[in-house]
Amino acid sequence: MLETLGNLGLGFSVALSPPILMYAFAGCVVGTLVGVLPGVGPLAGISLLLPATFGLDATRAIVMLAGIYYGAMYGGSTTSILMRIPGEAASVMTCIDGYAMARKGRGGAALAISAVGSYVAGTVSVLGLMFLAPPLAEFALRFGPPEYLALLLFGLLVLAYMSAGSMVKSLAMAAFGLLLGMVGIDQMSGYFRFAYGFVELGDGLGVVPVAVGLFGVAEILATAGKATPPAVIRPRLRELLPSRQEWRESAAPIGRGTVLGFAIGILPGSAHIISSFVSYVVEKRLSRHPERFGQGAVAGVAGPESANNSATSGAFVPMLALGVPSGPIPAVMLAAMMVHGVSPGPMLIQQQPELFWGFIASMYVGNVVLLILNLPLVGVFVNILRVPYPYLYPAILVFCILGVYAVNGSVVDVWIMLAMGLLGWVLRKLDFETAPIVLGLVLAPMIELSLRQSLAMSDGRYAIFVQRPISAVLLAMGLGLVLLNLYSFVRRGLDWRARLALADKGEEA
Amino acid sequence: MRTDRASGVVLALLAAAVLEESWRLGLPLGTLATPGPAYMPAVLAGGLLVAGVLVAALSRSTVTLGEAGWSEWRHTVAILATCAFVALGLERLGYRLTMALACAVLLGAVERRRLLPTLLFAAGLAGGTYFVFDTILRVQLPRGPFGF
Amino acid sequence: MTSRGTRGAFRLAVLVILLALVPLAAHAQEAYPSRPITLVAPFPPGGVADLTARPVAAAMEKVLKNPVAVVNKTGAAGAVGMQFVATSKPDGYTLLLALSSISIIPEADKIFDRTPAFTVDQFAPIALISADPTILVVPADKPWKTAKEFIEDARKRPGQISYSSSGIYGTLHMAMELLSHSAGIKLRHVPHAGAGPALTAILGGHVEALASGPAVVLPHIRSGKLRPLAGWGDKRVAALPEVPTFKELGYPDAEFYIWAGVFAPRGTPEPVLAKLRAATRAAVAEPEFKAAMDKLQTPIALKQGDEFQRFFDTDAKRLAEGVRKVGRVEDKK
């Protein structure tokens, strides 16, 4: 403990030295800029800007990348709240209640809450990273395909609870989203599925173009043509900050989101994406006013935004403790270290303490910088809503196309976004929710791969799921949850539709 | 036709089409112990089929398809067409030219703004975003055949 | 939906396009290179291809005194970027930095009767930059101390020992398949979505073996988590001099390299190719380039002209055979 604090002191002496601080600051600014592009989240942000850091020395480069990474994370929620454009898959849930708040004139409050929530989550999860990394990392690695599948089945349960309206309709959308996830090369057999000769579809439909299309573009299509353009919101200074009531409502969700996000984030793979969805559903279930969700519930912004922030720092646990590229973001960070001649791995902490602790310390510094940077910017960003819609929406479209194109340099992604925009517009008219499509698209490939990997590991025996302790416990918990809900459905004598939907659900799982 | 009934039927038809396609594409189904490439799609399409039928059967909507409020369709088509032009032109004409043209069309033709602000806005937005993201941040954006 | 203002805008736009076309004609007959060169890396930033492409581009830029930009065109295990270069104009301004998978993808397409996204003869090889043999690693708590023990155990229990790979027909999968055929053993394949997850799987103890490039697993060998058994090269890996090669152990067909090379589209004029060959030769000799590759712990293995062509052809033939032997996995069950 004392040793850790001493090391952290070393880290801060590195992170707070003026040149390093400057790079951290530059990283935060650049990250925010890129993160504001729809679709460019932390992963795309650091991938795109990685080459720009090749010329720097190792510590500066890593510190700057950490800044970019946090900046992109903060920047992503801005567009979600103000324009209903998810900055990345993890801020899809923020779009729903954040945008509803913005339309009610509480955009400033939503931005401030998400900045503070992200700050709390970022700082607390770095604490967790520092003190818990070694034991947690070993545990995280024990999550193999069977454990992963059990966890993802929980994710499916989340789908069932996500709807605000008709459950059958949202399950239909979930099934549709899961099906969309089947496009692309089958990683187990090499077959091309539903690609129709487009090599670009080999990796499947990207989550980013689908999310930006279904939310951002669909919103523009629905709003731009209205006979009366949407009222220009003129925020007053007094209304920029959250009210005392709103602070109170957001405190608990921020705390829960932080813990939940960190726990999910440490698992290898892309589990961090589902953290914000899980947090949203948890908040909705715990809320005394679940009917407010979707209409601008503060908890619906505070929870998911904190969760996705702490999940991505959680993803660094296996990387820093063991040098394992446990997810896409740590993998890029590891590559960055290799470029600078730092051999990542279990020995990193001993061999390069100033780099390691400098990195940890600059995560704290980055969070503070971003809070200082973002709170005053709330006032600036909110004023975007003053721009008349005929000027605003072409600009938003330009940013959407730019962001979606930049991630992979692929025009096919732009087409996917447009098609999904049209689909999202039609679905809105027909009163369907689109968030389950996005979660389904995220979950489907992971579920399929981990199921088939598990069966490859066990030579086709399903017993593997109950023989391994972690997956057995997870499955038992999931089953318990389902039974509990079935029981309450039956007791409340809820209509038979819900039960049918649940049975339907069981079949999919 | 009520909206729910129509959309339920469409979803069910889509599911059926997926089943038919995975058979037509010759994707092996595999077995329970060794699921093949068509296994999950078949299971999911089955789920969608059931869901679609349920949506149609339990239809609660009172609105017919025609009444769902498609009044802005002209705008929608115009915007989508402009975006399609962008997608086609992006790698052929280059980022700046394509975006400037698209913005000019959206503002000038679709929103009927005056010429001068339209041109200024289009050129400013296309050039500005290119400068910030490509020139400064090195996010590579396509240049046209005229190096532009 | 027209107004006077829009018509004006359209006229202006047309005028702008026409004016912009004028200098294009003058462009054609200039000495190569006269404008920026694009080096396509078909994998995302941070991957082996990207990390090799960046220093190559920087060094070539210095030699050619002309900008060389790396562009990541990713998707479908590299097929998207490779196809992009294969079909681009053979003028020497679009180059490709490819890995071994360039010879695998068209063969896998053939297995499934697909129209290949590209074929290997659509490329003119310029220079081989590096060629790292894969090495076989197992978790340190497994009983096998040598490759011999591993192979004997695998013979006794066919299909029982599992290994992870970067994906079906991926480089790490092919290396294992070449070994299996050479040694007459059968292993259980658990594909993962990329080399990172494959490494995580073996470190977590979910699989029992992995073929991997040396640089990635070295830290884990040094920390005692993984044990190297043998390498796929024709020489031992410099960083692991005590680890034998499969060739030494009597499995001559188990030869596999994760290599990186620069290609141009076939049909690029010979003078341009000659210039590019000279440029890459000078580029790999640059001290900055050597330092960069050193940091990646990847030895430079320059091969050009006929030598590279021969290496490329033998490698492609070996891999094509490997892919054919694997065939369609689903059909065998």
Image (spheres, grey):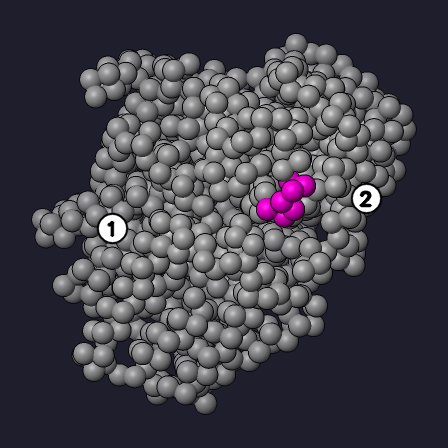
Q: Is residue A487 above or below residue A37?
A: below
Which residue does the image show at 87% across and 29% down from the upper left?
C310
Q: Position of residue B7 (x, y in %)?
A: 46, 80
Q: Nearer the viewer, residue B65 or C319?
A: C319
Q: Secondary structure at mark 2?
A: helix
Whether callout 2 and callout 1 share a subunit is answered no
Q: Residues within 10 Å of mark 2 (few under 14, many from 20)?
A: some
Q: Is residue A225 above or below residue C28?
A: below
Which label lies toward us, 2 or 1?
2
Q: Amino acid at mark 1?
A: Gly
In the rendered structure, find residue A303 and report the number of the disc placed on it: 1
Residue C49 magenta-drawn? Answer: no
Q: Is residue A196 left or right of residue B69?
A: right
Q: Chain of mark 1?
A: A
- Where is the N terminus of chain A found, in terms of image quarters? top left
State which quadrant residue A320 falls in. top left
Which residue does the image show at 38% across and 15% down from the upper left?
A350
Q: Amino acid at mark 2?
A: Glu
Which residue does the image show at 69% across and 11% down from the upper left?
C286
Question: Which stretch did the figure color magenta?
Answer: C154-160
Q: Is residue A176 above or below residue A248?
A: below
Q: Residues within 10 Å of mark 1 (few under 14, many from 20)?
A: many
Dots 2, 1 in contact, CB < 8 A: no
Q: Position of residue A138 (x, y in %)?
A: 37, 34
Q: Residue furthest left?
A: A244
Disc 2 target residue? C321
Q: Secondary structure at mark 1?
A: helix
